Image (cartoon, helix red, strand yellow):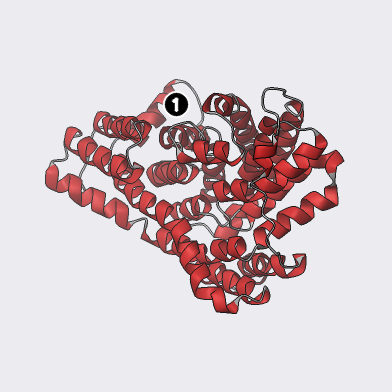
Amino acid sequence: MEAQFSTLGAIIGLVIAIVLIIRKIQPAYCLILGALVGGIVGGGGLDATVSTMVSGAASMMSSILRILTSGILAGALIKTGSAQKIAETIVDKLGEKRAVMAIAIATMIICAVGVFIDISVITVAPIALAIGEKAGLSKSSILLAMIGGGKAGNIISPNPNTIAVSEAFSQDLTAVMMKNAIPAVCALIAAVLLSSALAKKTDTPITAEDLEKANEKDLPSFLTAILGPLCVIVMLALRPIAGITIDPLIALPLGGIICTLATGNAKNLVSYTEFGLSKVIGVSILLIGTGTIAGIIKASALQYDVINVLEAMHMPAFILAPLSGILMAAATASTTAGATVAAQTFAPALLSSGVSGLAAAAMIHAGATVLDSLPHGSFFHATGGSVNLTIAQRMKLIPYEALIGLTSTVISIILFLIAG
């Protein structure tokens, strides 16, 4: 018989984890401790709590394996200069007059092909600052364009968050990626419009010190740079197109190897994979901690109590999908952790209420991009540092970022209402 925990215990555990994360304690440990306290307070007893935590962490293993192998692609794109070349080409083609659009699209594509959103922003930042200085843009507008483009790319990428929600609902990764294609385009448009409104903001001018970060390394040609990601897209698309399934566990690292070989860096393959591993090990460990608290929440009455509250307010059950994504991402200040906790916890309830797994995964995923950049997460600080914004300046962008994420969420809901 499975252990049962109270809603109060699950909430207390989550609150403890949030408070500790805000106090800058290692997030994985915060989530594990929150799960332990929540399970005990929730009436499960020590043995049952630990057992449920272990089971919750174990349920994340398939996602973690795919994320670990995705590091090969991310490492190759970054270390070969392919990611930077793709970004530079897009910015050069669109030119200074469309600088904001170029920056947003470049970050979107870099993120969409499998580079984590924070790394995508950091990769594009030197290029964006250089073109922004020529076009007279503010650092705030540049960063918002990159973050907005990254959010758009993130919900259509083979990144950890997409892998986690597709696993939770037993959906094909490519299908989940494509389900949010229209919301991603709408988020991109919102990012361009909002960034353009901040373009001449005078309190965050680009200085000579900001431009010192530009990277002048030799880069591959655009065709060789795009070859690896293109192969990944083709391999993942074979299932819906031809009924041939190539798991992301195979497609993602193979794309990284192709990228490395195509750019003439075969001798660096080992070092690039090690670099890629260093970029995904943190999120993999985070997901283990996420799994422990997700296990406790999933075994509690929380999901049913939330549904009862929605019913009492005469709100449809499907609202649980985007709402849970928004709240859990805000709690963890992480798209991946938020989407994972929401998907793992509420998948059974959403499916039993008649919401299709694909639509629910898409709505949770989009919702997780609304409040995922709060100050108690690393994304807030990493992105602010990429363009030398102060914490106060970075804080001012949060409402705009939320609007971009909310745009994709609302469009995802509308698509569900239209097509199911």
Quarter of the image for residue 293 reads top left
Residue drawn at the location 50% of the way across and 56% of the way down: 163
Q: What element carries label 1?
A: helix
Q: What residue type is labelled 1?
A: Leu
Q: 161 or 296, which lies in front?
A: 161
Residue drawn at the location 57% of the way across and 47% of the way down: 117
Q: Is residue 180 left or right of residue 195?
A: left
Q: Is residue 44 visible?
A: yes
Q: 29 or 355, which lies in front?
A: 29
Residue 38 image position (x, y, % from top left) = 23, 36
For disc 1, the marked residue is 310
Density class for disc 1 (Cα within 10 Å; few <14, some 14-19, many ≥20) is some
What is the number of callouts on the image? 1
Residue 259 image position (x, y, % from top left) = 63, 71
In this view, 221 is above or below 321: below
Q: Quadrant of the C terminus?
A: top right
Residue 261 image position (x, y, % from top left) = 63, 77
Q: 372 or 139, which lies in front?
A: 139
Furthest toward the bottom, the residue is 267
In this view, 336 is above or below 200: below
Residue 214 image position (x, y, % from top left) = 67, 49
Q: 335 or 71, which lies in front?
A: 71
Residue drawn at the location 38% of the way across and 28% of the way down: 308
Q: Is residue 411 visible?
A: no
Quarter of the image for residue 404 reads top right
Furthest toward the top, the residue is 313
